[in-house]
Image: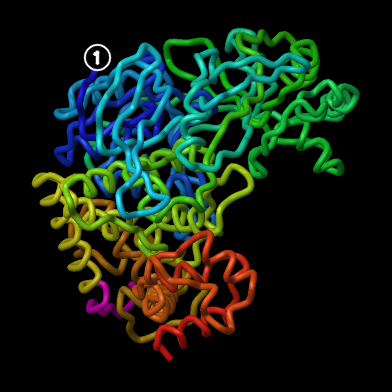
Amino acid sequence: MTNKTELAVIGAGHAGIEAALAAARMGIDTVLFTISLDAVANMPCNPSIGGTAKGHLVFEIDALGGEMGRAADAVTLQSRTLNLGKGAAVHSKRIQADRRRYQEYMKKTLETTPNLHPLQGEITEILTEEIPGEPGMRRVTGVVTAIGEVWECKAAVICTGTFLDSRIFVGSRSYASGPDGLLPASSLSRSLADAGLTLRRFKTGTPQRILRSSVDFSELEEQRGEESITPFSACTDRKKLNSISQISCHIVYTNSETHRIIKDNITRSAMYSGMIRGVGPRYCPSIEDKIVRFADKERHQLFLEPLGTNTEEMYLQGFSTSLPPDVQDAMLRTLPGMKNAVISRYAYAIEYDCVDPTELYPTLMHKKVRGLYGAGQFNGTSGYEEAAGQGIVAGMNAALMLRGREPLILKRKDGYIGTLIDDLVTKGTNEPYRMMTARSEYRLILRQDNADVRLTPIGRRAGLIDDERWAAFEEKMSKTAAEKTRLNETRVSGPALSSLLASAGLPDKPSSTLSELLKMPQFDYGDIAPVDPDRPELPPEAVETAVYDIKYEGYIKRQLAEVKRQERLEDFRLPEDLDYSSIGGLRIEAVQKLTAIRPMTLGQASRISGVSPADISVLLIRLGLK
């Protein structure tokens, strides 16, 4: 039986959902294939959305018109903003999500979105054909399911997560399986390799799930949610979100006895016995890896987190392992409050196939197979948020390609999603890639609060921002601009100003503008209220952006100047057929790297490992730019 669609999205995890929704909302007939419709939007690892830098990604996904932020707001159990003791650039929202409600929300959204057909079925083969007149190039023509259905299509987005030829490891035991006991996608890897993709083996893992009733919380440190919750999504009712009753998380620490048990059994770990070949995430290591790598540390912090309101299961973040069950039991009972803890699901490590992301364009389309896009862990990343960020870009670009429109390429200056994709396709990764604020050189202009300023116009042009959302965005922009003008132009003086300055231990002055006061590290918007009695009633999001723009104005100007300096390189496109071996003066390593990656712009070329500033100068001269 042969069916037809325009776009096939393979996998209904966080990447696949955003890819399918974006394409369908842009008018593309889309089929979303998943091994199990009951596992849509699954969170096989920690039940949370956001975190350091990851929160930025969620705000950006929402600004483009994606769904993750709205879903996260709808199922929030607890909300916290991390790094509040640091500058605004690194403030990052993180929520505990009700795992099952999140899945239900996303499944319903998929089922009710026009142009989108969620379909249970494992894809075992990608059909391609050679492109006449383009040696070595192929294009997508269809996909085949495990039960023999053929779906003709012109594009496909691969979002296989950790399912691609995946294997579970617990102690000395290993077996083919996806996460959470789901079936693996065992056949697709061969088809992808036959199409010319280079596959690699990565690894990740997850800790035990523990029953709440078996934990003595009196021995744990309670971690409450924040008093005022800022939504991830501009579409969320802030008052309704702040009316929820938040659930606490708890902190617990390992100890010398925990470490002794792990060390005594280290050879029984699948990771240290040589069974696992895949490379694991450096920034989220297993507990046995922490004990070995940080042998001088007396304890490691763990977080006990709820999975939902309708389950007793809790998640012990930071305790992932591939040690056998008896060792997992023993080391768990050494933790405070866990003497009688009951495990409902044992921890495991999982290996899976992924692509070399340097084989992708910044559009996330593969360089050898036209119409074939990748997103999420298939591209070598870790994390739900990294996956969703790539998913929406891949889905948008597949839709734009199918409609013959110009592709979307997010630059590093545009957001963390742009930084993430540029890092992957330009530098590659030899381990599961995790987004961090330190990866961006433009942190002050890529804040959470201004994600809509940077990306909502892009989402609007693509067709993902409707009229109502656009009107609300324009209203926020207008109010933000007006408030910045008012703060810059309003001058205050007299006893109220003297009292305010004295309260902060500052010398008196005859007068000051409100913006000058805000630029002082001692004051925030609320602090200067006594000298600003006539301030207008404004939405918190408009105030936040106005204040941060003023507070960091000098730094922002410097970053914008750096952006402008880089634009010359970023905007100059390199010829697709440029023969780097024919350019005299380029070092051999540079020729090899440039030929392999085929950068689209000089800016991208300048960030390739092994390409020096001298090589870029040679290219500038060769292309007549110097």
Q: Is residue 288 magenta?
A: no
Mark 1: few/some/many CA within 10 Å (<14, 14-19, 20+): few
Q: Which residues are magenta?
A: 487-497
Q: Quadrant of the C terminus?
A: bottom left
Residue positioned 66% across, 37% down in the render:
280
Name the residue carrying label 1. 1
Number of numbered discs on residues:
1
**Residue type, label 1:** Met
Q: Quadrant of residue 526?
A: bottom left
155 and 414: which is toward the camera: 155
Is residue 365 found left or right of 478 in the rendered image?
right
Q: Give the percent coordinates (x, y) of residue 445.
A: 39, 65
Residue 586: quadrant of the picture:
bottom right
Q: Nearer the viewer, residue 139 or 208?
A: 139
Determine whether 45 is above or below 291 in the image. Answer: above
> At which x and y percent is residue 543?
28, 58
At 38% from the left edge and 31% from the top edge, which residue is drawn? Answer: 126
Q: Nearer the viewer, residue 471 or 510?
A: 471
**Spot occupied by residue 376 in the image (x, y as percentages of width and height):** 45, 39
